[in-house]
Amino acid sequence: MKSVAILLAIVILNFLLIRLAPGDPASVIAGEAGAADAKYIAQLREQFGLDKPLTTQLALYVGGVVTFDLGWSYRNQRSVADMVGERLPATLLLTVTAFIVALAIGIGLGVLAATRVGTWADSLVTVAALGFYATPLFWVGLMAILLFSVNLGWLPAFGMQTPVAMPFGDRVVDVARHMVLPVLTLAVFFVAIYARLTRASMLEVQDMDFVRTARAKGLAPARILRAHTLRNAILPVITFAGIQAGQLVGGSIVVETVFAWPGIGRLAFEALLQRDYNLLLGVFFLTSVMVIAFNLVTDLVYSLVDPRIEVGS
Amino acid sequence: MREFWQRYRRNKGAVVGLAVLAFIVLIAAAAPLVYPASPWEMAGAPFQRPFGEFPLGTDMLGRNILSGIVHGARVSLMVGIVSTFFAVTLGLALGALAGYFGGVIDDALMRFTEFFQTIPSFVFAIVLVAIFRPSIASIVAAIAVVSWPPVARLVRGEFLSLRRREFVQAAVVVGETHLRIILGQILPNALSPVIVMASLMIASAILLESALSFLGLGDPNMMSWGYMIGASRSVIRQAWWMSTFPGVAILITVLALNLVGEGLSDAMNPRLARKGRA
Amino acid sequence: MTEPLLSVRDLTIDLPPGSDRPHAVENVSFDLHENEILCLVGESGSGKSLTAAAVMGLLPQPSVRPSGGELLFEGRDLLKLSEEEWRGLRGRRFGMIFQEPMTALNPVMRVSDQILEVLQAHGEAGGEDRVTELLQAVNLPDPERLRSAYPHHLSGGQRQRVMIAMALALRPTILIADEPTTALDVTTQAQILALIRQLQSERQMGVLFITHDFGVVAEIADRVAVMQHGRIVELGAKEQVLEAPTHDYTKRLIQAVPTLDPPERRPLDRALTVLSVKGLGKTYRTAGGLFRPRRVVTAAKNVTLSIRKGETLGLVGESGSGKTTVGRCVIRLIDSDAGRIDFHGVDLNAFRGRALRPYRKRVQMIFQDPYASLNPRHKVGDIIAAGPIAFGTAKPDAVKRAQELLSLVGLDPSVIDRYPHEFSGGQRQRIGIARALALQPELLIADEPVSALDVSVQAQVLDLLADIKRRLNLSMLFITHDLRVAAQVCDRVAVMYQGEIVEQGSTGELFRHPSHPYTRTLLDAIPGKHWRARRA
């Protein structure tokens, strides 16, 4: 329910932003047709409903969005929904993979550091996390290209697949090879965040009463770690991962731009270059929907892990 | 104050961070003295390797990369500090109102905050800067608009718990006004986590600005680190130094800010600090 | 006498460098025998809990570590055991229960699984059936249903029963109980104490019972060890320590425990009525929001009471009874939704916000937690002077008044420029009293003013309150869960249960002839009620 309300608010925001964008569609088309005369523009405005009151226009726009009509890209002469739709799978592949990789590595490193507090392993994880937390994603990507593609030649630097025909099995391997650098680039920042968070959370939970109870019961350290400390320490990490979903999607824009990954992030960059505001806002809308979806999934996961959250509330 | 510095000093990383940060601020302040010429001007032959005529080489238009980095420091720090100032002010105001008055006000403000927190912030910043045309003002505004929600949530949480504390109730009972209670009783106790958050926010604002400039959304009149990387990435195979050094500058600055943030956090919450380090 | 189960010899535990004393525990020696309950009693900071933790090998190492002595158990020195060997003993030979039942259980694991875990960890068979047996043994209702319950489904008392079931799962030889009833209500406390006593004698266990409460000692102990500043100052059979203490400290502590015999009080029937509350009601509704169901809790229902000039009315009850809600409604920290609050005949419920200000200075409050009730960033002088300044007194006058008040509450006026953290709990509570007096109120609402204090400090603060009340002829609403305190302080007592006042009357009458069944239950549950029942 809450998600629907937020979605509606985003649609309204999107509408307002379109209105604020420089040049209304009528003058854009008129300009492209080379006919800037006032009468033609007025006719176009009527055709697009731009002469109607704002609320009517909003209603029309909301009605459009509900039927997956995100407007028209005048530059590309295509529907925005079609354009973002065909790019979506590539972005989902990238972000979901990076998300899972980041969670797995980040939590793993956080646990490693927390269980060995004060040792060199802890210091290494802490320092590395601090460093990657401070590094811009696009620069990590460029340096990765420089190292692994240009100098070592191990992995492809651009695109999602080699543009030649090949059997399905080879194609899977080909895409996987193309994925390595973008996924790791996108993941590394979040690995840093999750590792720091997991470490801090583990250290906090370690001091809690119920861990002392577990020790008083004579449980083995591995059992205490798994069933008591980690089970509880992971909760704030899940919450935070949900909050961070927006950042992940935002990061994909930069990463897709660096690696020429054919997703909606790359599309956003192209829209920027072409000053195609309708397309840009289409991307904005879709990424917002992605974030809401991510949030719903993390909420669901959280309610599965924490019995205190009653289903349905 | 001396006690505070004593505690801060115990975190070695934070002391190094502070020194580095001071150095960067100094460079930024002295940029026009060190390199009086505009960083946009051609200084020598293009594509010169580093450690030759120019310490960090020149770019494809023959511009001095070190000069660009020195001048870029001004932009990065300015954008970081100003946008954080606005974001913190907004977040403080909304969070304080929501946490202090609770009820319907809290509900409304928190729905509003949640909404802004759901919108993917980087994409939103791109959209805002693109629509309002790239300029230093639109960049600062966009970063502020997307960064305030965590501050509001933090401040609300602090106010909410402090509001129930007995010393605040005692202030109500002795007849202090709402304004006095908010400013005199609660705010001073809620401020330390906000200061820590602010120092970390300057860091993320700098990262955000660099990403915007990288995508070509920087102020066209201001040399910035992100722009330098974005402009030279197509020649990365021939000239690695053009995109490497500005990136190092970002890394060092952001790292220094994060270290300072951690040091502040340790110094302000001595109890938590020991826990984290043991 | 038989061989002791556990023999503690010259145990010394170091504190980390920079603490206020080098040793938390110093040369402590005692024996724990089969089939006995040994109470380790002392005030906060006496080292009693660390002693218990050391016996379980659960000290927060490395910051706090044992540096000397022996813990002899079955011919072995426990201090020399490896972590591996300890693990075999914990849970199997030693069981432990803790103070906070709310946090001592893992919130995301079913309670039955948490019990099962003990059996599995020590390779015990029987599993599920044994869990059900154990739940029955600690008198938990409906063990079948409890299989799927998580800790948040249970009340504090039920959680403590689960803890006991867990600690006793493998029939340990020794049970260590660290303030196991301190966080519980008095009636629940009585049940848990009875349960521990029953299980102890059934299984002939040796129980090391840590407590700060002499009432609990009187209720449960066979032998008593009194600790002060990390040392045992007196050790002996319960009767001897409680009735004929030899050490000065023990004498002082016991003297500070209020008796259950209310003193005679002059009648106040003819004095002016200051406060008259009629039909007060307060219902909490969780906001719920658009899509969540609302929850409704009736905190106070049809509460009627009155206080005369110079009178102290005690409002007693367990947690959740609504006594704090009533206090906060009267002082208008929260709005009630039914009834009248007449203060000198004027209904305070008719005012809101600014209109209330004239009454703010005439009704003041003393809070429970001396650490939370003073703003850590304000100087003591500013804290006391804040009220008069808010009402327009010039700053120099307000500061002068603050100094006078400091001496009135027994503090040196020169401390005016210090911050709260430089004071002890008792001193802070004095500052809180000075703040309440600064506006020269007629009525004081005291919300559990001594329950966060050690017993010896508690006695001093109560004496101060009584003295000030008499000198200034104040009226007081005294909210407390502690019936011993109520017996000593109050002229009349009102008993609250589930939001309603079930009985009220003069203190002597109510303690001697309680008429409502709940009042009787409450009085019956007082730990050690037969001890110090009369004044010496």
Image (cartoon, coloured by chain):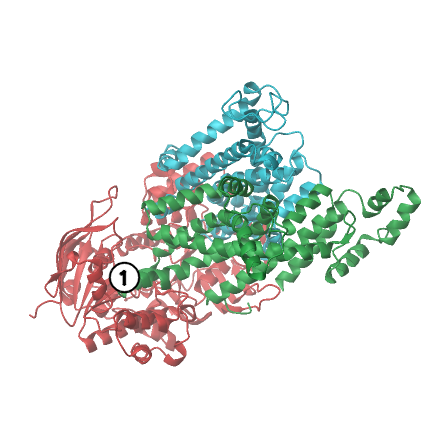
Q: Quadrant of residue C260?
A: bottom left
Describe residue B259's horizontal placement relative to residue B107 as left or right.
left
User: What percent of the width, then of the height, locates residue B88?
Assistant: 56, 41
Nearer to me, A49 or C11: A49
Residue C511 visible at all: no
The chain holding disc 1 is C
Nearer to me, A28 or A142: A142
- Picture quarter with the C terminus of chain A: bottom right
Q: Chain B: what color?
A: cyan
Q: Residue at x 47, y 50 (%)?
A: A191
Q: Which residue is mark 1?
A: C258
Q: Chain A: what color?
A: green
Q: What amino acid type should be assigned to the residue bearing mark 1?
A: Pro
Nearer to me, B156 or C352: B156
Q: Which chain is red?
A: C
Query: What count of labels does the image hold?
Result: 1
User: What percent of the width, then of the height, locates residue B1?
Assistant: 40, 33
Residue pushed farthest right? Answer: A39
Q: Residue at x 37, y 36 (%)?
A: B12
Nearer to me, B262 or B107: B262
- Picture quarter with the N terminus of chain A: bottom right
Q: Residue at x 18, y 70 (%)?
A: C173
Residue pushed farthest left? Answer: C1
User: What percent of the width, then of the height, locates residue B195?
Assistant: 49, 40
